[in-house]
Image: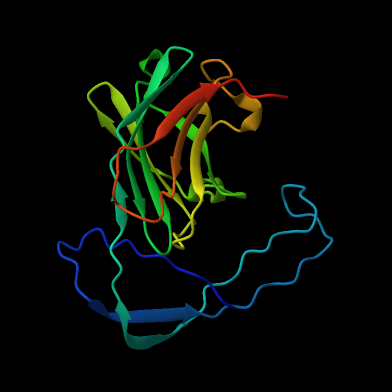
Amino acid sequence: MSGTFNFDTTILEDAPQSLDLRLEVAVILSAMPPITATPDAAGNPGGTMAAPDGEPVGPFIFDFTVPFIPAIVLMPETVVEANGLPMTLEQVSITPSMTRTHLCFTPPDNAPDWLPMVVLDIGEARVEPLSSLGIAPTTATVGESRCVTLDFPAPYDLHAAQWTLRVERLQRAGQDSGGLAAPGNSRWTFRRRDAGRSPKNQTCWQTGSKRPTA
């Protein structure tokens, strides 16, 4: 069993050369009951898979030091309008492990639960936000604007590439792909050449909006 974890270092007020870290892990071992072909009480085939609570093992403690690489922070404050609805890319933060974007817009009908459905293209690679895996994005209301912070598993690698952040539609929270509600079919598109290489020219983002092709 293995996994990868990312930790937010924006709470740091300075930029040290390295970080002395301690990772504590506790493991809970439990036996999964076998799946049977007998329907459960609700009539669902296969019964239930509820596992009994196990006893924790550990903690396992790891002390280590890693170099600290500060984020490349871009402040484009670029506005793109599609179907009469402006959207602002306020900030992009790029680190060796992920990319974070901060988008703000005035929600249609002043409803507070609209979310942008976003993809990030880096060269020939397309990256979905962590929200596509069920990890809820951070949202906030600033005046009449709704602001959404989205994280992408897209690290910078210091290679030249065109970065394209595309908002394909707006969707009410809790709706699936079959229940879309968006202001038309336009897209909000933000582009930047070499976004992951240098913090210079932070406002140099090209913009555009277009209707998607079939």
Where residue 108 sits, quadrant-wise, is: top left
Q: Residue at x 52, y 78 (%)?
A: 54
99 in relation to 49, above or below: above
Q: Position of residue 58 (x, y in %)?
A: 41, 87
Work out whether residue 173 can be spotted: no
Residue 52 shown left or right of residue 107 in the figure: right
Work out whether residue 154 can be spotted: yes
Pick whichever, 196 or 37, lies toward us: 196
Q: How many discs appear?
A: 0
Rendered-image quadrant of the N terminus: bottom right
83 in relation to 199, above or below: above
- The residue furthest right is 37
Q: Position of residue 30 (x, y in %)?
A: 58, 78
Q: Position of residue 69 (x, y in %)?
A: 30, 68
Rendered-image quadrant of the C terminus: top right
Q: Residue at x 40, y 80 (%)?
A: 25
141 in relation to 164, above or below: above
